[in-house]
Amino acid sequence: MLALHDRIFVVQQWCLLRSATAVRRSFRNRDPRYHGKNLPSLQSIRNVINHFKAHGTVTDLRKTTAANKKRQIPEEDVRSVKRLYYWKQRFSVKRASVKTGLSRYRVRKILTRIIKKKPYKPEKKQLLKESEKLRRVTQIKILLSIRDLSSKLVNTWFTDESWFTADGIAQKKDGYYWALSKDAVKPVEYQEHPIKVHVWSAISEEEEEEEEEEEEEEEEEEEEEEEEEEEEEEEEEEEEEEEEEEEEEEEEEEEEEEEEEEEEEEEEEEEEEEEEEEEEEEEEEEEEEEEEEEED
């Protein structure tokens, strides 16, 4: 919906130009923010013009309905939320909803739209002694004095460390503070020696060279291992092929022996048949001789 001064401008331009398209173009010359997608639509301009023709005004004549009254937040709810966050800034929306009996959406709406507060995360500040602060300053001065001397920097180790605490103090994920500005949120101090895990690392130029050499050595070892594995695989394949050839030769020899045995059996059978035939012939001759003798 267009603002009141924009609706007045629409009616003024329409009285002069008598065209909704020309009125829409005139917005570009009026304000640089009305360019491209920010231009009001033709339908919005026509609605303003039709409303002015029907009622003679550009103001919204709609009465406050029961639904609109429900949208208005009661003063009691606003006062209860203000009272709660006046004494304690670090109070989650969920806990405030439980304390006041309001919904989370309403509590957040009161904080952001009426009280004009925003959720901020506190900065983490280490609790240092004065002697430790002076020691850090001297170390920084020494590093700044040698930063242009490359010969010293080559032999310099750059270290970094990080602590992972187990007590959960000063958590950033759920530690929101509702305030009007970030300056109103005080830094959270924490103990110097809580229960924690320390991770430390150091880097230098020489270390990088050593790492490169180690990586090259590892790559060479991997290549040698791969070559050895390939050779072993080739040897295994050759052995398998030799075994297969030997098996084939044995099978061929067995087949040849079987063929020879079959041939021998056939020869024996033939010999037996020949003997039987000879015996039959002899018997026939004897019978013929006996018959001749009987006839005589």
Image (tube, rainbow, N blue to C red):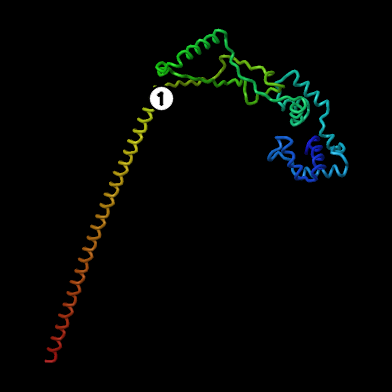
- The reply, left or right, for residue 94 in relation to residue 170 is right
The image quadrant where one finds the N terminus is: top right
Residue 85 screen position, x and y as percent: 75, 21
> Residue at coordinates 17% horizontally, 83% vertically from top-left?
284
- The reply, left or right, for residue 277 in relation to residue 30 is left
Question: Furthest residue to the bottom?
Answer: 296
- The reply, left or right, for residue 108 in relation to residue 221 is right
> Residue at coordinates 82% horizontally, 40% vertically from top-left?
11
- The reply, left or right, for residue 186 in relation to residue 255 is right
Residue 70 screen position, x and y as percent: 83, 34
Give the image quarter of residue 226.
Answer: top left
Q: Nearer the viewer, residue 211 or 11?
A: 11
Please, is residue 160 above or below residue 256 in the view? above
Give the image quarter of residue 273.
Answer: bottom left
Question: Furthest residue to the top?
Answer: 131
> Residue at coordinates 69% horizontally, 25% vertically from top-left?
119
Please, is residue 127 above or below residue 237 in the view? above
Q: Which residue is mark 1?
A: 208
Give the image quarter of residue 225.
Answer: top left
Please, is residue 59 above or below residue 132 in the view? below
Residue 259 screen position, x and y as percent: 23, 63
The image quadrant where one finds the C terminus is: bottom left
- Secondary structure beneath dot 1 equals helix
Residue 255 screen position, x and y as percent: 25, 60
